[in-house]
Image (cartoon, rainbow, N blue to C red):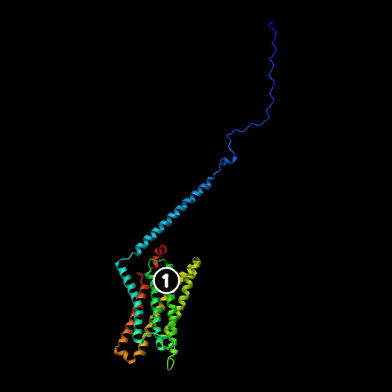
Amino acid sequence: MDSNSVSPMPELAPIAEFDKTPPTPPEDTLPMDDLPPPPTTVNMHDEKEKDVKDKEKEKEEERKKEKEKEAHRRYEDENQWGCGSWLEYTLVIVLASILLLGSLALTLFWIIKYHDGFSWRENPKKQFNLHPVLMVAGFITFSGFSILLYRICRCCRRIYVKLLHTVFHALAIPCVAVGFVAVLDSHNLNEPAAIPNFYSLHSWIGFVTMGLFAIQFVVGFFSFLVLLCCEGATAGFRASLVPIHASFGLTTFMLAIAAAVTGLTEKAIFSLGDEYSDWKEQGIVINALGMVFVAIGILVSFAVRSPTLNTDTKVLVTERL
């Protein structure tokens, strides 16, 4: 073979046709629903504001806790009672309670022993006997305890004390009403002639006492119980009524004491006449009952006005219970 000859090119393999089928996805590809959400952009300014607000809220809560602790410590320091305070409280409250119950018991003893008990319109004289007993029960015993409740119930919530205060006054209403009807009937049905009404000092004082009692009950019921349904809107109004209500309540109670004492004197003069000055047994009982009423007036007034027995500064404890 000639060395200068060129060898022919090898025949190329035929070009394969382009595969137009799409490639199959890999088996481990996750669906779009299972993918995590894209990262959100964080505003550094909002983050700082949020941190500042959280810190301020924490500081505010800490300040509130400190104020409550300081107020509680101040309350304990200012209102911690010693032996003298407890002795004063025990003597006044216990003695006043005994006298309030004792006045009603002594009135019952006086009427039953010396005036033959009770009756209704068939015997006007015995019907009159209902008057002193029911008036003492309503105006003095029930009303006295309703006033002392604010000193006796020291560890109760104010709303419970108010409810009990209202209950005792509500118990006094039927006593006063029946006692008033009894004295009117006994005067009008008296034989042989009717006895005039509302001519004595006792009747005038009693009439004023009943009027003040009715006004006090209505105003107190609507102001301190009904208006609690909108407590926030009426708080200032109710707070301004508290000293007025307390002052007129004590005034009404003192007028009831005065009416009872003048009524006893009037009954002693009518029943005993000239024998009243002879130290009769009934006269001594009447005078003793009158002195019990005077002692009740002194003790109840002292319990209400004494700064030691005052519970207005103890709202922090009563509101938490």
Q: Most extreme residue toward the bottom, as rendered? A: 192
Residue 45 position within the rendered picture, expressed as x and y whole percent measured from the top left: 53, 47
- Can residue 248 be seen here? The reply is no
Residue 162 position within the rendered picture, expressed as x and y whole percent measured from the top left: 43, 70
Residue 279 position within the rendered picture, expressed as x and y whole percent measured from the top left: 29, 88
Which quadrant, please, contains the C terminus?
bottom left
Q: Is residue 90 left or right of residue 49?
A: left
Question: Which residue occupies the foreground of this view, 247 or 197?
Answer: 197
Which residue sits at x=46%, y=78%? 214
Q: In which quarter of the image is residue 19?
A: top right
Q: Which amino acid does label 1 sit on?
A: Leu
Q: In which quarter of the image is residue 66?
A: bottom left
Which residue sits at x=29%, y=90%? 278
Q: In which quarter of the image is residue 311?
A: bottom left
> SS class of the residue under badge 1?
helix
Q: Identify the residue position indicated by label 1 in the image.
A: 164
Q: Most extreme residue toward the top, as rendered? A: 1
